Image (cartoon, rainbow, N blue to C red):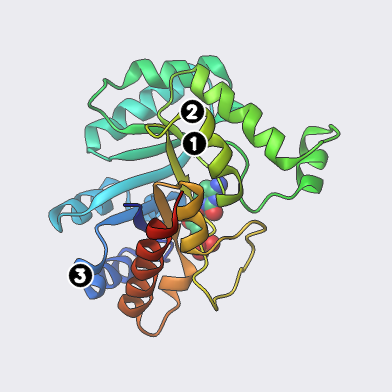
Amino acid sequence: MAKTIVALDLPSVGEALSLVDRIGEAAEWYKVGSPLYTRAGPSIIEALQERGKKIFLDLKYHDIPNTVAQSVAAAAELGVALLTLHAAGGLDMMRAAREAVGSDGPRLLGVTLLTSFSAEDVEQVWDKELRSLREEVARLAALAVEAGLDGVVASALEAEALKRRYGSEFVVVTPGIRPAGSLAGDQARTATPGEAVRAGSDFLVVGRPVLQADDPVAVLKQIEAEIAKGAEDAP
Ligand code: C5P
């Protein structure tokens, strides 16, 4: 069954940990991104691990191969379970990351296109005509596979084709999840939990719908119910 990852996009360690404690057993997985990690450093990872949580370290590494290999090795020492690097960093960078972690280390995920990106954004940044966002995601995902990464971060719209092509072992992590009735915010490509599960996503990343809720546990339970329903309907 797909798992929910709560994106801990909160401005301070205190607020992050009080949310984690308020959520309690209702979530096992947390995503630590660059804002919180930049504030708190490895101590946030240790605090989550003390609470029995699993960590997705979303620092989206993108640098020269040697630097990324060292960063990934450091993340592996911290004991995180999932981490991200930009597929746009290229084959050598991703291969260096792969070599830096053993087979029992964190699973390495390629970031293809940020879910906030539209076709116009891609055209502006890369100065190229796009036939479709999907093709661009597929092209970058193929690079990640060639480099030996374990999976990718991809919207639900792309998950289905990626799973079909690379098989059920290929890990797909999907942000931009919006339970029925919540706001999209800056996400250009959103999906409900049910849609993401039916598309084959393994991990569903949810930030603001949980962080801004009056009752985060109720929202997580709603998401769990939508995941279970989606799993029943999945092909
Ligand atoms: O608040 P929201 O649910 O939109 O948060 C989504 C989280 O997933 C954010 O932390 C964002 O950085 C992250 N993310 C994303 N798109 C990606 C990779 C990560 O939105 N491609």
Task: Please tell me which residue is depicted at 51% across the width and 49% down the height of the picture.
Answer: 199
Residue nearest the viewer, comparing 134 with 212: 134
Q: Position of residue 33 (x, y in %)?
A: 43, 51
| Relative vertical location of residue 171 with respect to residue 11 in this rendering, above or below | above
Task: Please tell me which residue is depicted at 27% across the width and 54% down the height of the picture.
Answer: 44
How far separated are the C-alphas under marks 3 and 2? Answer: 35 Å
Q: Which mark is residue 163?
A: 1
Q: Position of residue 166 (x, y in %)?
A: 48, 28
| Relative vertical location of residue 147 with respect to residue 72 in this rendering, above or below | above
Residue nearest the viewer, comparing 89 with 64: 89
Q: Which residue is mark 3?
A: 24
Mark in the foreground, 3 or 2: 2
| Relative vertical location of residue 112 with respect to residue 103 in this rendering, above or below | below
Q: Amino acid at mark 1?
A: Lys
Q: Which residue is mark 2?
A: 166
Q: Amino acid at mark 2?
A: Tyr
